[in-house]
Amino acid sequence: MSATTAITPKFSMMTTPCRICFKAAKWLPVLFIVTVVVWSYYAYVIQLNLFTIASIIEKCFYLIVYHVLLGLFLWAYWQTIFTDIGTVPKQFRLPPTELDRYESAETDEVRRDVLERFIQKHSLPVYNRTMTGDIRYCDKCVQVKPDRCHHCSVCGVCVLKLDHHCPWVNNCVAFTNYKFFILFLGYALLYCLFIGATTLQYFIKFWKNQLDVDGKFHILFVFFVSIMFAISLVSLFGYHVFLVVKNRSTLESFRAPIFRLNHTWMQDKDGFSLGALNNFIEVFGDDRKLWFLPVASSLGDGVSYPVRGQQPPSTTTATTSPVQSYGSTQTRRTAFKILRASLGDGVTYPQRCVDEDTDDLLGARQRWADDEEENELMCTGYTNSHTHALEEVIVQANHTNPV
């Protein structure tokens, strides 16, 4: 199997006219959304605000808030649609010699050995495995899958931190545009709720036969459409907020990633969870001014991720602190917050030293070590500088190094 053949999408075998029709058909859901938004603009701005509402103050307030929400909603929608999906770096692709060895292997053991040697040779930060403990490998893209990466059958490529392929944006929702997708859902929900709330009184007037304007049916329909979309959006938006807080993707919520736990490969839905705040910062970034703007601010590179209670050994050298190993584009300040949130195993903790005089006041002498020398070493270890103490802390993790 050649690399060219492996990464070719299924519809590449179609004739040129069929391929064009197939690509055009994928834009129909997006065209539907745009059509609904354009019509809602006409119904709300023209028919309601210009021809129905008499109060100038009410008109100005409605129009200002409406256009702010509309602008943020369309901005986030644009970013979600046209942001390039994250592609897997070239170092995860098997070179021709190793690809030949992999494809010519007669047993699974040989294939497993080829992949194990490949990730060790290139120090690839791969933690997740299959249920049998094998390295996750894509036969279509002929490459090792980074953690949280999955192959999209619609796009025909492996996508970094794939959440799902969304037909309403004609794009994969993944690492590069997940923040934009969350904001798109949130602002779309606010857009619909605002229209529904401000047109409610006019719907009541219509119901009482007190609304005598030419565009009353536009006002009636825009009220029902906004409420209908709001009901569907509130559950979808709430679900993805839950996923952000838990640091999961839609795929991971249904099929948990597999880590090495107690010398056994087991599923763990919370393997990438660093706490609610750190999970939020990983998606929205550490700059609060950018949290609710559709601009790129997510942390990390989409390839390696902090694992709960564990520092990635494949990216940490003798001169690299544990803080530096959490993604190439992550700031040290935020990485340190993440590391602090995951230190310890919940059983052993640093102890404050008690001098001899104070110890005598306690009555029976307290000894936390077997002898005086060991106790002295323990006290000295936690009175060094902050940086040295951080290097000496052993991160007790549930997940052990699989590589």
Image (tube, rainbow, N blue to C red):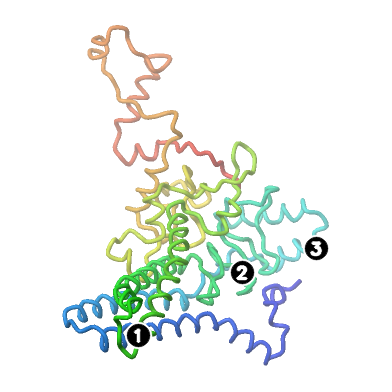
Q: In which quarter of the image is residue 28?
A: bottom right
Give the mark, 3 or 2, whose residue is nearer the N terminus.
3
> Mark 1, mark 3: which one is toward the viewer?
1
On screen, 158 above or below 365? below
Q: Name the residue under label 1.
A: 216
Q: Quadrant of residue 343?
A: top left
Q: Which residue is drawn at 49% across and 75% down?
A: 84
Q: Which amino acid does label 1 sit on?
A: Lys
Q: How far apart are marks 1 and 3 (CA)?
A: 71 Å
Characterize the local packing of mark 1: few (<14), some (14-19) or many (20 or more) Cα atoms within 10 angstroms: many
Q: Which residue is drawn at 50% across and 39% down?
A: 397
User: 152 or 184, which lies in front?
Assistant: 184
Give the mark, 2 or 1, whose residue is nearer the N terminus.
2
On screen, 205 above or below 399? below
**Tag count:** 3
Q: Position of residue 321 (x, y in %)?
A: 40, 47
> Mark 3, mark 2: which one is toward the viewer?
2
User: 34 or 376, which lies in front?
Assistant: 34
Q: Residue at x 32, y 41 (%)?
A: 387
Q: Which residue lies most toward the front here?
A: 209
Q: In this view, does 239 lie to the left or right of 356?
A: right
Q: Mark 3 points at which residue?
A: 104
Q: What residue type is labelled 3?
A: Ser
Residue 152: assigned label: 2
Characterize the local packing of mark 3: few (<14), some (14-19) or many (20 or more) Cα atoms within 10 angstroms: few
Q: Position of residue 31 (x, y in %)?
A: 50, 84
Q: Position of residue 350 (x, y in %)?
A: 36, 29
On screen, 199 above or below 292? below
Q: How far apart are marks 3 and 2 (CA)?
A: 26 Å
Q: In this view, does 359 lie to the left or right of 191?
A: left
Q: How far apart are marks 2 and 1 (CA)?
A: 45 Å
